[in-house]
Amino acid sequence: MFQRILIANRGEIALRIIRACREMGVETVAVYSEADRGAHYLSLADEAYCIGKAAATDSYLLINRIISAAEIGNVQAIHPGYGFLAENAHFAEVCRECSIEFIGPHHTSMEKLGDKVSAREIALKAKVNVVPGSDGLVADEATALKVAGEIGYPVLIKATAGGGGKGMRVARNDISLKSGFSAARQEAEKSFKNPGVYIEKYIEQPRHIEVQLIADQHGNCVHLWERDCSTQRKHQKLIEESPAPNLPKSVREDICKSAVRLIKSAGYYNAGTVEFILDQDNQFYFIEVNARIQVEHPVSEMVTGIDLIQQQIRVASGEELDLQQRQIKANGSAIEIRINAEDPDNDYRGCPGQITKLRVPGGLGIRFDSHVHEGYRISPYYDSMIGKLIVHRPTRKQAVSAARAALGEFEIEGVKTTIPLARKILDHSAFIDGEIDTTFLERTF
Ligand code: ADP
């Protein structure tokens, strides 16, 4: 087991990893930008090094600075968290070349799965359903029209290097396909320096269902059941839960088994998530793999009782998984609500500033994963998420009521947040009945 690890991240996930390590008796080295100097969570790490200016490109994304900090801090491994360098295969490779273990998958499986077209090929080989679509990249408009003609409108043009919903365009006819095709290519080139796009059938009002997995370096892989992340705004998840409501048992078992098959056939290890969309007939289709720990991992932790960060560290150190699939039960229902500092009156733009008053909820089955505190200054340089409220109860109905009550306990002054929107969602009959699809939020509010 590692004695000391570096956390190449900030905010709530840095704190989450520090906590997991303290419990395991593993020492931690934190890194921070000038904007995060003095953040309270840093004092829980054994050491902390400043690695640069506020902008992520001048600090959290600088591989050389992070490796230097790791060498000075004398760590055996680096945990990348999510975002920043977490899915950068080059970073994973550099870490290992410097004899520092990267707490994540091998860089080759990361590369193969990070590219959506090649991930689709892996899924097909593993006999996992993919969304009907083009055979690989679509090079020009004429081919795009031909593919769309074959699969039928509506279609979705997607960037192979895509992420965060960027470079995606829906086309409902030849005219919008032509304009969407070049727009998607340009956006993909601009955002990912890779203009490659492909075409998929656009599934109307799907649910987003994903499966959490953990695999070791000895060929063992288990799933921690599924999460439903259909409550999204502009393809960004707002509320996630486990188990997925109203999912037939056989579909649930199939989807989880498919995810394990895919991960095993990719030779993947460490934590990962296989994402699917589910159409209105409960047919599921693979969309992508997230080769990292995800923001919403706590809902799976709550229902299974398994600490995913600790599992990541164990398997990265070479240990064999000590989990048997049949022992992993999903107990009760867990819901996570992301609390973002965003302004509802300004199209939910980030709302940086100082938190002048903070009261957070507590009680049985209430978990608040957050690095903020009263007096904390939210920086404009990073994402707007200030915390995650996670509620765990024996039934979904109870979880929804508990989440509603917990949201009502929050008092946050100084910045605007997404709490009022979350409360409206929890009060909506479609959410209460577990009948949410990815277009619900935009259709309803
Ligand atoms: P990104 O990597 O940019 O987040 P994803 O492939 O994960 O892109 O898709 C993001 C979201 O877009 C999904 O959660 C889903 O809501 C929607 N989506 C993706 N593919 C399709 C599709 N074929 N049909 C309908 N919606 C889709």
Image (cartoon, grey):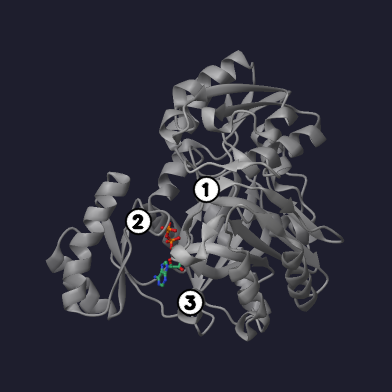
Q: Quadrant of residue 150?
A: bottom left
The verdict on label 1 being within 8 Å of ligand 1 is no
| Residue to which mark 1 is pinned | 352
> Which tag is nearer the camera, tag 2 or tag 1?
1
- Residue 360 position within the rendered picture, expressed as x and y whole percent measured from the top left: 76, 55
| Residue to which mark 2 is pinned | 117
**Is label 2 in a helix, a strand or a loop?**
helix
Circle 3 crowding by C-alpha within 10 Å: few under 14, some 14–19, many from 20: many
Seen at 70% across and 44% down, the residue is 373
Circle 2 crowding by C-alpha within 10 Å: few under 14, some 14–19, many from 20: many
Seen at 76% across and 28% down, the residue is 26
Q: Earlier in the sequence, mark 1 or mark 3?
A: 3
| Residue to which mark 3 is pinned | 206
- Residue 151 position within the rendered picture, expressed as x and y whole percent measured from the top left: 28, 77
Disc 1 marks which amino acid? Answer: Pro
Disc 3 marks which amino acid? Answer: Pro
Question: Separation of disc 2 and disc 1 at Cα?
Answer: 37 Å
Q: Residue furthest toward the right? A: 364
Can you see residue 66? no
Seen at 52% across and 17% down, the residue is 68
> Which tag is nearer the camera, tag 1 or tag 3?
1
> Which tag is nearer the camera, tag 2 or tag 3?
3
The verdict on label 3 being within 8 Å of ligand 1 is yes
Q: Earlier in the sequence, mark 2 or mark 1?
A: 2
Tell me the quadrant of the picture where the N terminus can be found: top right
| In this picture, residue 11 sits left or right of residue 91 | right
Residues at marks 2 and 3 touching, judged by CB atoms closer than 8 Å: no
**Is label 1 in a helix, a strand or a loop?**
loop
| In this picture, residue 439 sits left or right of residue 272 | left
**Quadrant of ligand 1 in image:** bottom left
